[in-house]
Image (cartoon, helix red, strand yellow):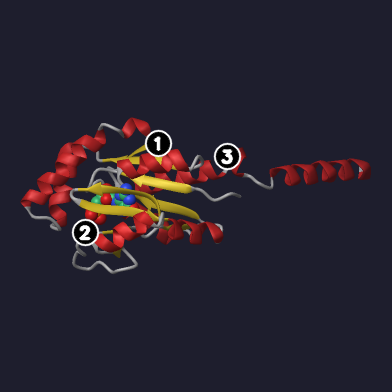
């Protein structure tokens, strides 16, 4: 089967990163694309696991060298998907999860025809604000900035293929896993379909002869 990109977007605090981590922990057929960013590392984050943390100069050099599949600015910082991240998982036959914002998702849509785009929304506005505030990774100004972007991002949910409501985490993870299962069964992704059906036809003919 041809592996594909699974793009997860949501407003900041919407839960896409947690959903992606849960999904990755439970299945071996998907890999995570570690993005590059110029934002500061948060406590507990690890370079190469959560992000590749780069200086502005390093990031720009990679843009110039064409190393990004997509890249965008978010709240004054730069973020991008490295082609090498996607390629290493595809080479191993794994689907690749991208946890990216909406402008990057649009670029992926244009460049990768088989990509599946999922938008994760919170059940209520209050839930989103509470989750983001509870994370305590931002001061008040940054929090308000992210919430302003979140409001804009919600407006483009209609550009995605699927919408998942993250009211209860386990349910949302199951929903995304269901999308992955259904998408992997699409005829266009079955590169061995012809040989399989041909073999089945031969087997049926053999079995009929033996009747
Ligand atoms: P955070 O700073 O909270 O980790 O991420 C901020 C936003 O940037 C989130 O919406 C996240 O999904 C997005 N983001 C993370 N990596 C990438 C990337 O490689 N490309 C793009 N376009 N957005 C990204």
For label 1, the SS is strand
Which residue is pictured at 62% across the width and 39% down the height? 187
Say left or right for 146 vs 181.
Answer: left
Of discs 2 and 1, which sits in the foreground? 2
For label 3, the SS is loop
Mark 2 vs ligand 1: CB below 8 Å: yes
In this rendering, the count of numbered labels is: 3
Q: Report, in whole angstroms, how far the alpha carbon at label 1 lies from the one at label 3.
A: 15 Å
Sequence order check, earlier mark of 2 and 3? 2
Q: Report, in whole angstroms, how far the alpha carbon at label 2 lies from the one at label 1.
A: 29 Å
| Location of residue 56 (image quadrant) | bottom left
Say left or right for 51 vs 210.
Answer: left
Q: Quadrant of the C terminus?
A: top right
Say left or right for 68 vs 58.
Answer: right
Query: Which one is in front, 142 or 26?
Result: 142
Residue that mark 2 sits on: 39
Sequence order check, earlier mark of 1 and 3? 1
Which residue is pictured at 41% across the width and 61% down the height? 25
Q: Which mark is residue 186?
A: 3
Q: Is residue 16 visible?
A: no
Which residue is pictured at 39% across the width and 42% down the height? 107
Q: Residue 108: x and y, percent?
A: 41, 43
Q: Residue 88: x and y, percent?
A: 49, 62
Q: Residue 49: x and y, percent?
A: 34, 66
Residue that mark 1 sits on: 162
Q: Report, in whole angstroms, how far the alpha carbon at label 2 lies from the one at label 3.
A: 38 Å
| Location of residue 60 (image quadrant) | bottom left
Q: Residue 97: x and y, percent?
A: 42, 52
**Furthest-left residue in view?**
140
Mark 3: few, some, or many residues within 10 Å (few <14, many ≥20)? few
Sequence order check, earlier mark of 2 and 1? 2
């Amino acid at each position: 089967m041809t592996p594909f990109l699974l793009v997860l977007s949501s407003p900041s605090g919407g839960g896409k990163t947690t959903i992606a981590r849960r999904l990755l922990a439970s299945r071996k057929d998907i890999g995570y694309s570690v993005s590059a960013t110029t934002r500061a590392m948060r406590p507990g984050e690890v370079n190469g696991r959560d992000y590749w943390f780069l200086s502005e100069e390093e990031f720009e050099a990679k843009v110039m060298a064409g190393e990004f599949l997509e890249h965008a600015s978010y709240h004054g910082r730069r973020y991008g998907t490295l082609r090498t991240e996607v390629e290493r998982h595809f080479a191993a036959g794994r689907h690749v999860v991208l946890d990216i914002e909406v402008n990057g998702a649009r670029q992926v849509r244009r460049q990768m025809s088989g990509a599946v785009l999922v938008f994760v929304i919170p059940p209520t506005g209050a839930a989103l604000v509470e989750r983001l505030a509870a994370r305590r990774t931002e001061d008040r100004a940054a929090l308000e900035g992210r919430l302003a972007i979140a409001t804009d991002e919600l407006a483009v949910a209609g550009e995605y293929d699927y919408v998942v409501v993250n009211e209860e985490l386990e349910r949302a993870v199951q929903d995304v896993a269901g999308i992955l299962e259904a998408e992997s069964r699409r005829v266009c992704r079955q590169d061995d379909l012809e040989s399989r059906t041909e073999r089945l036809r031969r087997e049926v003919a053999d079995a009929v002869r033996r009747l």
